[in-house]
Image (cartoon, rainbow, N blue to C red):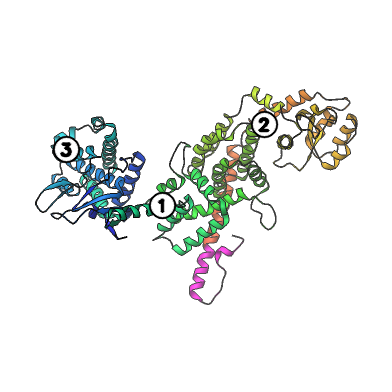
Amino acid sequence: MSFEADDKHVYDLFTKRCYGTPRNQRQYVWNKRNWQELFDDVLLVATGKEATHFIGSIVLYKENDRKNGISYFTIVDGQQRIISLTIFLASVAFCLHCYEFDDEFRGTKQYLFTRDDLNQEAMVIKSEQYIALERIITGLFSISPNMAKRFETAALVKQFSQNNKNLAAAFVFFINSIYKHIEESTLSPIQVLLNLRTAITDNLLYVDITASSEEDAYTIFEILNARGSALEGHELLKNFILRGIRPDGDVDTAKTTWSEIESLLGNNIERFVKHYATHKYRTSVQEGISDYKLIRDSNKGIPTVPLLDDIYQKSIYYNRLLSPSQSEESANCSNVEFKVYAFFKKHRQEQIRPILLSLIHQYELGHLSQEKYEETLLFLYDFFICYTIIGQENSNKITNAIYKNSSILENHYSDSALECFISELKNKLPSKEVFLKAFSNLGWSHHAGYYDDDRNKERVQVVLEVLERYKCASKQCAAFTIEHILDDTNSPENGIIGNLIPLEDSLNSRCNGKDFASKLKIYETSMFYTARNIAQRYAGKSTIDINERTNIMAMDFYNRILKSSICSVQKNTNDTKMRKQGIETKSTIKKTIGNMMKKANHSTPENDLPDVQQLSFL
């Protein structure tokens, strides 16, 4: 197999060359998303944010020797890019024509038409598939500036058949995008247009792979497009970050940081990238762009060191969601965080993670007080219990709310933004009638019957825990067993939730075989508010109305818990100010010690003071 591979500029692609396309190749299929990506890439170079941009490899088959100074090629791989660049250059030429920059307009023609040694002119791309391309470009150089100014680009698409409408639509897109950029730029129109032209011809790079035979060309094409294991999002993201580290960062340090991220997240790294993109950049579930491209496009043209630092910090947060722990050696969260994170992990509620990442970050930044932060976590906990455990709703129905609000809370946090998100979730709750009916279906019995199921037991436990927590105005609830007030041994229907209360295991065992009055005496000694309340309310009575109590519990849950609000803004503001002052003080101390250590290192090279990051009290 014989071929040549060279790094070249797009200028070389459009100089003294003519291209054809095989009949078996697909039509021009690029769409607005592809055009926008190309325009944005060129704009980064044209505005000086990037020096060059690489557009990939292009595989060509050289048909024969040069003829009258012109080389002829068949495009094997890269026709979508070549045609799009041709349209882009033609659009620049059209705008130059409209502004009556005649010399620059004529100068652009050399990239669209080639002239041989006999002074014969031909289009750079000649193909039966792309009649519209030839007609538009040829027509562009045959009309006057006044006609160009009067030309309605929107009408262009209507002039061609369905097969060629996409080509015409590409012209319309690039022309409109160029005009918009001219309006927004502080530079003169001529400077903007020349910057765009130069960016395309001189600063776009590609690998030119030219095969000596058609068979070799297609062999190369198959190798380049082999169906191997496609790179995953996190692998593409790593490559993008390392490529953009310089000049502000050290590549070796960046590689070490990324290795730490991979070690921390393990097999969950791809899921993390998905949730990170949502939490930071995505605004709608309907956005079809991939997670990697969303992150990449939001960070084009700027150093990637801040991006890597942010991803590293968020990976630490994400690890808490994956493996919440309170053990002495690996403790990584508070009591409330552990309760909420462990609940979401157990019930596989992964779609809430983007919101949690935003909340954790705002808390760490000092924008959220500890009280408001924990109350928000508990609201989410209670909401999911109501929505998915009691209401049996599909949590995918709230995905739009999460996608919409995660990036707002991360990038534009305010108390009102948080309240808007909470209100949006509350609006997803079922009506009171629907909720009461769903609540009345809760129950558990360890005897055979309708409620004899571990899942029913778990549902009852979390509901009793929430009710107890709110009754005693606490953020925590101790471990308990489920006590049946009326015996369910021979009456499985007594498994309904209105007959159930939380009770210590030791007291529960004492209740076995006891009558109603004796049980009430035991309940009086319980640490649980619910049990003591039952003992007080039903003292002197012989039984309870299970259905009535079920309804009361449901009303309490719906009215007092799910409709409650987060703590007052004023209190949160005061707490937040104190927290911010603490963070700022901590940052100042760290900076001061760091400066002292730098001076010490300069004055005494042999000193072995610890690195500032090793000082645990910071």
In magenta segment, residue 601: yes
SS of the residue under disc 2: helix
Q: Nearer the viewer, mark 1 or mark 3?
A: 1
Q: Give the magenta part as a residue range.
A: 592-618
Query: Is residue 55 at all visible to an observer of this figure?
Result: no
Residue at the image point whose x is 47% and y is 55% from the top: 308
75 lies left or right of 592 = left
Residue at the image point whose x is 66% and y is 28% from the top: 558
Tell me: residue 422, above or below residue 369: above
Q: CA distance from mark 1 to mark 3?
A: 40 Å
Residue that label 1 marks: 226
Q: CA distance from mark 3 to mark 2?
A: 67 Å
Q: Amino acid at mark 1?
A: Ala
191 lies left or right of 599 = left
Q: Quadrant of residue 57?
A: bottom left
Find residue 496 and report its horizontal and vertical position in percent.
Answer: 76, 28
506 lies left or right of 256 = right
Residue that label 3 marks: 139
Q: Nearer the viewer, mark 3 or mark 2?
A: 3
Task: In this rendered view, identify the residue nearer to me: 102 or 85.
Answer: 85
Q: Amino acid at mark 3?
A: Gly
Q: Disc number at residue 377?
A: none
Q: Amino acid at mark 2?
A: Ile
